[in-house]
Image (cartoon, rainbow, N blue to C red):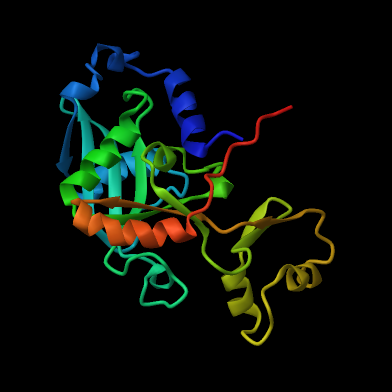
């Protein structure tokens, strides 16, 4: 399965425009690319069109733009982190002061390596810091960009599936439990009981977690040691037979 963003970029590249392929005249070399802080409204111009979730996070903390020839060609958005992923939670290995990279995307005509170059540039500018990001299997993501950056893959957070597709309709399991009765479970058995006539019930797995660490060696060393102890092999995309 291709990642959602790749599919969107391919579709956008083939879609006809009133001005034709105007981006062919843009210098997309990385040595001339620039990065700068931008507003959430500006970031949304890219995120809403190319990102899988199609939304901006609720609690945005900062946004950065990636530019070719002064034209916005990518955006990344940092936001408040989910509480269960902090070291204040005894089950988490993610540093409590880590930044949360909640959204990120580049336009279809950007340099092929724009995403990794862009994220690395931003993280180095924010260093010293550790950065948490997710890969979403539902979107066909395995974290290719984070693997290219040599981030640590620590697997999905603990717990079962986050949702299910029931005959093509997505249902969040937390909402399923809330809307029915908090006393009942939210496992697949309960879902099957609630939808006995469903033809297809497909569980949605939890997102994979990646952590990157940036800064001088004295800052990185203890964090990387802790992450290395729990790091897992990178997931790979299945090759069709």
Residue 93 in sight in this render = yes
Q: Position of residue 204 (x, y in %)?
A: 63, 56
Q: Position of residue 216 (x, y in %)?
A: 18, 51
Q: Quadrant of the N terminus?
A: top right
Q: Residue at x 70, y 71 (%)?
A: 187
Q: Is residue 199 above or below residue 110?
A: below
Residue 64 in sight in this render = no
Classify residue 69 as left or right of residue 8: left
Q: Nearer the viewer, residue 25 or 6?
A: 6
Q: Position of residue 208 (x, y in %)?
A: 51, 54
Q: Residue at x 31, y 65 (%)?
A: 80
Q: Is residue 57 above or below residue 27?
A: below
Q: Residue at x 48, y 31 (%)?
A: 6
Q: Quadrant of residue 124?
A: top left
Q: Quadrant of the C terminus?
A: top right
Classify residue 78 as left or right of residue 89: left
Q: Position of residue 103 (x, y in %)?
A: 36, 49
Q: Residue at x 52, y 64 (%)?
A: 157
């Amino acid at each position: 399965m291709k990642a959602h963003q790749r599919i969107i970029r391919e579709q956008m590249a083939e879609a006809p425009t009133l001005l034709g392929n105007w981006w062919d005249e843009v210098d997309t070399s990385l040595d001339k690319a620039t990065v700068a802080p931008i507003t959430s409204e500006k970031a949304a111009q890219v995120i809403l069109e190319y990102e899988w979730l199609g939304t901006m996070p609720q609690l945005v903390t900062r946004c950065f733009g990636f530019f070719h020839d002064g034209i916005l060609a990518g955006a990344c958005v940092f936001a408040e982190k989910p509480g269960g992923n902090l070291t204040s939670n005894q089950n988490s290995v993610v540093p409590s002061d880590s930044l949360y990279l909640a959204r990120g995307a580049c336009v279809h005509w950007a340099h092929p390596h724009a995403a990794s170059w862009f994220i690395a540039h931003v993280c180095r500018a924010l260093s010293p810091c550790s950065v948490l990001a997710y890969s979403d299997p539902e979107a066909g993501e395995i974290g290719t960009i984070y693997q290219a950056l040599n981030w640590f893959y620590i697997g999905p957070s603990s717990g079962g599936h986050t949702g299910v597709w029931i005959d093509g309709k997505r249902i969040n399991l937390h909402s399923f439990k809330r809307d029915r009765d908090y006393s009942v479970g939210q496992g697949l058995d309960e879902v099957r009981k609630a939808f006995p006539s469903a033809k297809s019930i497909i569980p949605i797995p939890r997102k994979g977690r990646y952590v990157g660490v940036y800064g001088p060696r004295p800052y990185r060393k203890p964090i990387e040691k802790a992450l290395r102890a729990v790091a897992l092999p990178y997931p790979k995309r299945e090759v069709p037979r």
